[in-house]
Each structure stands twice: as C-alpha cells, then as structure tokens.
Image (tube, helix red, strand yellow):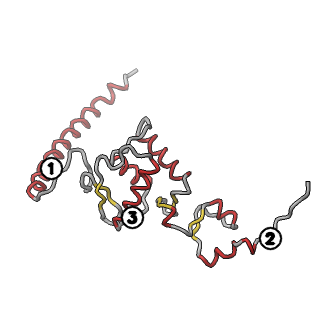
Amino acid sequence: MTNPVNVFQPAIDALEKDYEDLERQANGLLTSINVLRTKAGMPPRPPGQLGGAESGSANTGNGRQIVLHSDTFTGKKLSSAVREYLEMRKSSGGDAPATSREIFDALKQGGFASNAKDDATAIVVLRTLLRKNTVTFAKLRNGKYGLRSWYPNLRTSKEATAAGRSSDVTMVDDETDQTDNDENLPEKETTAA
C-alpha cells in the first residue's frame, strides 16, 4: 500500500513554489505602491492587506470610508461597539445597515477584543447578539442589520404574527397600524374563579 503523504508531496511542493513566487511578486508590487503612496503624502499600505480599503478604514458600501483607529472599540462591550459602529456608518452618509461580516471585520479592525476562542466563534456570538437583541438591532429583509431606532414602523416577527402577518420583519404604514388600536380589539372575557 502506498503512503498518501508520498503521493501528494510532489503536488504540495509545486504549489508551495508557486505560492512563494506569487508572494515575491506581491511584495514587489507592494513596494512600488508604497513608493508612490509616500510621494503622494499617503501612509504606506501594510503587508498582507488585500483589497482597496485603506488601513484603518472600513467601507460603508457606496465607496464611503469610516476611519477606525486601532483602539476605537477597545474595552467596549459587544453591543455598545456594534451600536457605535452602525452610528458611524449612518453619519458617514453611506449605506448605514451592515452585514454581520462587515460589522465583525470593523470591530476587529477597531481593536474590539472578543473572549471567543477564534474568529468563527466570535462571529457566531455577534450574529446571535444581533438576532436576539431586537430592542436595539433590526434585521432587514436584505440580510443587513441596522439600529431599531432608525425604523420606527418596523415590527418583529412576534408583533407581525399577533397582527395576523407571517413575515419575519414587516414595515408598517401608519394607516394600517391604526387597525391595531385597543379600541378596535374585542374585549377580553373575564371568568370568575
């Protein structure tokens, strides 16, 4: 019987050589980029950063950037840090709601320290907070999260079900909301014990 390690070793060696070559090319490009950035009066891009976002900034969707310092969320509780980040997105004039991944990446970049053992666990904790804390956060139909205070006519699934609707989150017009007034509901019968 052939040892599986020996069968795959040539492929592993070839891929590692290709990776090293690409890494050298990337480092050369980064050096060129940083020479031009320095001449333009911009800070150099740190190694290992992918994409076009500046170091210390988070994208809000419409190309708008939020400047995040490495200690923006240091020492804050998760709920407070998320709320602050969403407010920053709103005040930047870009797309205010964010996906859980966008929120997680921004908090991490801003120095938020999670007690989770790894990033996968930390993002699960974040998603759970966003889903369960419906007093503060609202999940929109597009999968993004915003602050509940931004959506005064937004109902939770419990409220929608009580009103005879079955969607997770429902936008309600003021006119349709009038049918739910106490005066239009039947009186509850009381029974004597």
Q: Looking at the figure, which quarter contains the N terminus?
A: top left
Q: Residue at x 40, y 46 (%)?
A: 76
Report if the CB atoms under discs 3 and 2 are less than 8 Å apart: no
Residue ID for mark 1: 29
Distance, label 3 to label 1, CA atoms, is 35 Å
Residue 186, label in figure = 2
* Image: 63 above or below 107: below
Seen from the viewer's position, the closer of residues 139 and 5 is 139
- Residue 165 in picture, x, y percent from top left: 66, 67
Tell me the amino acid under the disc marked 2. Pro
* Image: 25 above or below 192: above
- Left or right position of 44 against 102: left
Seen from the viewer's position, the closer of residues 26 and 63 is 63
- How many other residues sit within 10 Å of disc 3, few (<14), some (14-19) or many (≥20)? some
Residue 154, label in figure = none
Q: Residue at x 65, y 64 (%)?
A: 160
Report if the CB atoms under discs 3 and 1 are less than 8 Å apart: no
* Image: 130 above or below 159: above
Distance, label 2 to label 1, CA atoms, is 72 Å
Q: Residue at x 24, y 35 (%)?
A: 16
Seen from the viewer's position, the closer of residues 105 and 6 is 105
Tell me the amino acid under the disc marked 3. Lys
Seen from the viewer's position, the closer of residues 144 and 88 is 88
Looking at marks 3 and 2 on the same chain, the residue that comes earlier in the sequence is marked by: 3
- Where disc 1 sits, the SS reads helix
- Residue 168 in picture, x, y percent from top left: 60, 61
Tell me the amino acid under the disc marked 1. Leu
Looking at marks 3 and 1 on the same chain, the residue that comes earlier in the sequence is marked by: 1
- Residue 150 in picture, x, y percent from top left: 48, 66
- Left or right position of 96 against 134: left
Residue found at the very far bottom of the displayed protein: 175
Residue found at the very far right of the displayed protein: 193
